[in-house]
Image: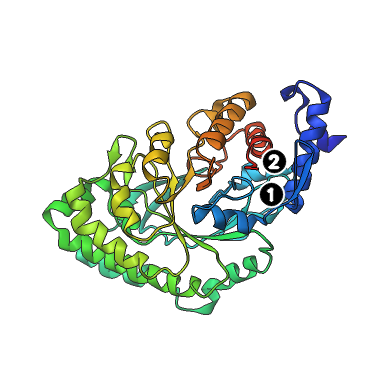
Amino acid sequence: MSEIDSVRLSNWSTCEDVIRSYIVRRICACYSLINISGGDVNQQMTPRERVMTALSLGRPDRVPWVEAYVHPTLANQILGRTVTPAPGVRVVYELHEKLCLDNISYDFHAPLYAEIDQRGDLMLVRAPWLKTWEDLDKLQKWLPDNSVDSFYEGAKEYLKHKGDYAAICCLKIGVANTYNSMGYEDFIYKLTDEPEFIVACFEVWGEWCARVIERINNMDFDIAFVAEDIAFQQGPMVVPAQYEKYIFLFCKKMFAKIAKPSIYHSDGNYTALFDYILQYGVKGLANLEPPCTDIFKVKQTYGKKACLVGNIDLHHTLTRGTPEETITEVKEKLERVGEGGGYIIASANGLTSYCKPDNVMAMNDAILKYGFLG
């Protein structure tokens, strides 16, 4: 009875509900073979098929669930045991024992050229080092050598066990690396006063990232997840004219190197930049942070142009809310955004260490209960 107890009996009105949820979750999460709905038993897609169908604006059997990362602390709480991920692994395989996640995820982010203060999920820049042309020369020598085969061995080993899951490769292409290594204020000043320095920094980071892209193009990844934060909750970090003149042209060149279907991620409200970003050829827009991003309006405007990814609240619902609140939000997003396809449900960034395990399990159960499209 211990596994059933973990579903938390207090969150359900009757024991029958608990047992039914447990059975459905175990069948779907472990095998992804059948859907029990209204007495009908139907052949279902594999997790990879589900994700790729939604990403292509198709209508999958169930709205897929994808997370770019799940913090190890949270993963261990959900699993009830300690699993230590290898370097680069963002989603441990073992989570599929408990969750109906449809993906695995590996990280190829370039390191920041700065003194870093790591506080749990938060990586804070204590002292940026990229200030001068001399610093830029030092950066090129400081970056890890990603031209050697050993740099990719961890990813190759991870992919050996991908099974039927969608394998996501997490990348950056140089914009966020530049402003984080420089300090946002200096970045904005130099973008106006010394734009040639900003462009040169982009090119150095871009050269490093291009070598990663060349390798992952020939690896068994299914999707490139490009995380380039470019917005605050109030809107873009830079004015559209600067974005178009400097950032847009660089990003378009970098995305052209990616042979895998791609998803673009930014925190904040970057809807004002969607028309630029779609010109990169991306298939998906993530993670559509609420409440500053109204996903229902985005669905109306862009739902036929790109797959929408995310929007489950991390400010309250998953982190401070209740299982009941989680179920309510997940159900609404599944029904209003997922109908017709072209939606991948996910948190508004990733499953952080401060997400409540009970709420993540409630999200899982709501997806299995309300996510099948029939």
Q: Is residue 210 above or below residue 1?
A: below
Residue at (27% x, 44% y) in the render: 237
**Which residue is identified by label 1?**
95
Q: Nearer the viewer, residue 112 or 1?
A: 1
Q: Residue furthest right?
A: 1
Q: Is residue 206 something one can see in this rendering?
A: yes
Report x, y in % for residue 356: 61, 33
For the rendered model, the colour scheme is rainbow
| Residue identified by numbered label 2 | 78
Q: Secondary structure at mark 2?
A: helix
Q: Secondary structure at mark 1?
A: helix
Location of residue 231 (image quadrant) = top left
In the figure, is residue 68 to the left or right of 177? Answer: right
Inter-mark Cα distance, 1 to 2: 8 Å
Q: Mark number for residue 329?
A: none
Quick one: label 1, few (<14), some, or many (20+) residues within 10 Å? some
